Image: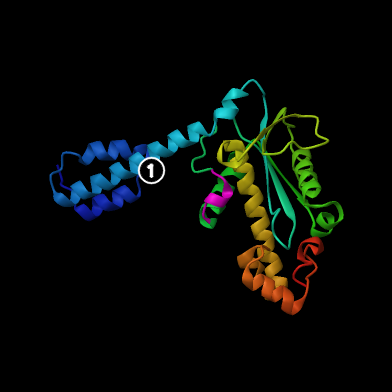
Amino acid sequence: MEVRKIGEIKEELKATTETELQQFIQKYSTDERAGVKTVVNQAQKRLEKYEKELLRIDALKIYERKYADYAFICGVDEVGRGPLAGPVVAGAVILPKDCNILYINDSKKLSEKKREELYDVIMEQAVVTGIGMASPARIDEINILQATYEAMREAISKLDPQPDLLLNDAVTIPEVDIYQVPIIKGDAKSISIGAASIIAKVTRDRLMVEYDKVMPEYGFASNKGYGSAAHIAALKKYGASPIHRQSFIHNFI
């Protein structure tokens, strides 16, 4: 049998998916070359990380399992309650019952690159998703909490099929007839809420990047409307933009 070069084995590991790692390890476990042992050890570490993630994701389904009798369980979350500019955005996601999307988490705990990757996977695999928004003017008009509820109701209204259970991050949404379960820090405890937080975050961040192209002086692409020192300095220098929340910025201008 031809003995493979260590460089070739390294390349094979790069192309090996998580589900194939055990097979890869068995294939090369008897090779006594130091370089191959190093590659096998790397594969073993990858496998351990993958198995740990499987357990974490399984734990994220505790509420989905608890309410498994409901046909369509929807996770609901919002992003953008705190910024000085831009809308508040809500996401609503119904995942399939057998969903095994790895690395879903509270969107704030994920890198931008990982959020973007997961956004595409969620949009592809979800039963249905919905996005709702409330503008800065609407936030000023009815306050941030009511605007958040409004965005959540809009996100839910866009779902077809409609859910028969809502798992919400921390809140009970008024004027919604669907049974609701509020979960404190739900975006880190429920796979459905985590998915909703990711699509809401990516949607809002992309929007703020577009605003930055029109109004570059505020640095919206980097600060996403939050009150960074540079953003506040720009606000004092240039005044409010059309997307600033007047009720949030009176201390600065």
**Residue pushed farthest front?**
251
What secondary structure is marked by label 1? loop
Residue at image mark 1: 17
* Residue drawn at (63%, 67%) of the image: 228
> To which quarter of the image does residue 54 belong?
top left
Image vertical order of residue 213 relative to residue 174, above or below: below
Q: Measured from the top left, where is residue 198 in percent x and y?
A: 60, 48
Image vertical order of residue 11 relative to residue 126, above or below: below
Q: Is residue 175 magenta?
A: no
105 on left or right of 12: right
Q: Quadrant of the C terminus?
A: bottom right
**Residue pushed farthest top?**
69
Residue type beneath disc 1? Thr
**Residue pushed farthest left?**
32
Colouring: rainbow
* Residue drawn at (73%, 53%) of the image: 88
Number of marks in the rendered image: 1
241 on left or right of 118: right
Q: Is residue 107 magenta?
A: yes
* Residue drawn at (73%, 76%) of the image: 236
Magenta residues, start to end: 105-111
37 or 185, which is in the foreground? 185
* Residue drawn at (78%, 41%) of the image: 153
Q: Measured from the top left, where is residue 178 in percent x and y?
A: 77, 29
227 or 199, which is in the foreground? 227
